């Protein structure tokens, strides 16, 4: 899921740097809360980033049209 117009590569960057206000509004979690949950293993950064990468690959493929 894309949260911004920025072409995300790391969901963590979006949450902690690009759109922390949107993340707080949507989840009710602050960046500090998110970082704690990541450190406890509640959020798996590798899996989140893999999902972003796979979505981006799918999206890129769907944008290539043959005229």
Image: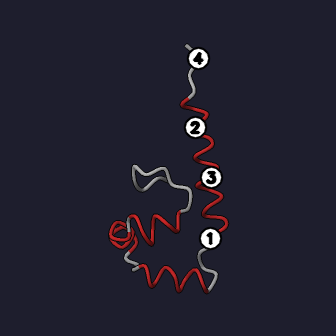
Number of other residues with Cα within 10 Å of mark 1, as a class: few under 14, some 14 to 19, many 20 or more: some
Per the image, the residue denoted by label 3 is 53
| CB within 8 Å, label 4 to label 3 | no
Point 64% across, 72% down: residue: 44
Point 64% across, 81% down: residue: 41
Per the image, the residue denoted by label 1 is 45
Q: In the drawing, what numbered circle is on residue 66?
A: 4
Point 53% across, 63% down: residue: 11
| CB within 8 Å, label 1 to label 4 | no
Residue 21 location, x and y as percent?
33, 70
Residue 58 position by quadrant: top right
Mark sitting earlier along the chain (4/3): 3
Residue 36 location, x and y as percent?
53, 86
Please count the marks in the image: 4
Residue 28 location, x and y as percent?
37, 76
On-image quarter of the C terminus? top right
Number of other residues with Cα within 10 Å of mark 2, as a class: few under 14, some 14 to 19, many 20 or more: few
Secondary structure found at label 3:
helix
Secondary structure found at label 4:
loop
Mark sitting earlier along the chain (1/3): 1
Q: CA distance from mark 1 to mark 3?
A: 12 Å
Mark sitting earlier along the chain (4/2): 2
Secondary structure found at label 2:
helix
| CB within 8 Å, label 3 to label 2 | no
């Amino acid at each position: 899921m894309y949260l911004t117009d920025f072409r995300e590569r790391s969901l963590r960057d979006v949450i902690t740097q690009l759109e922390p206000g949107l993340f707080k509004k949507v989840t009710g979690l602050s960046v500090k809360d998110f970082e704690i949950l990541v450190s406890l293993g509640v959020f798996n950064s590798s899996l989140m980033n893999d999902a972003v990468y796979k979505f981006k690959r799918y999206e890129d493929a769907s944008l290539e049209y043959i005229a």
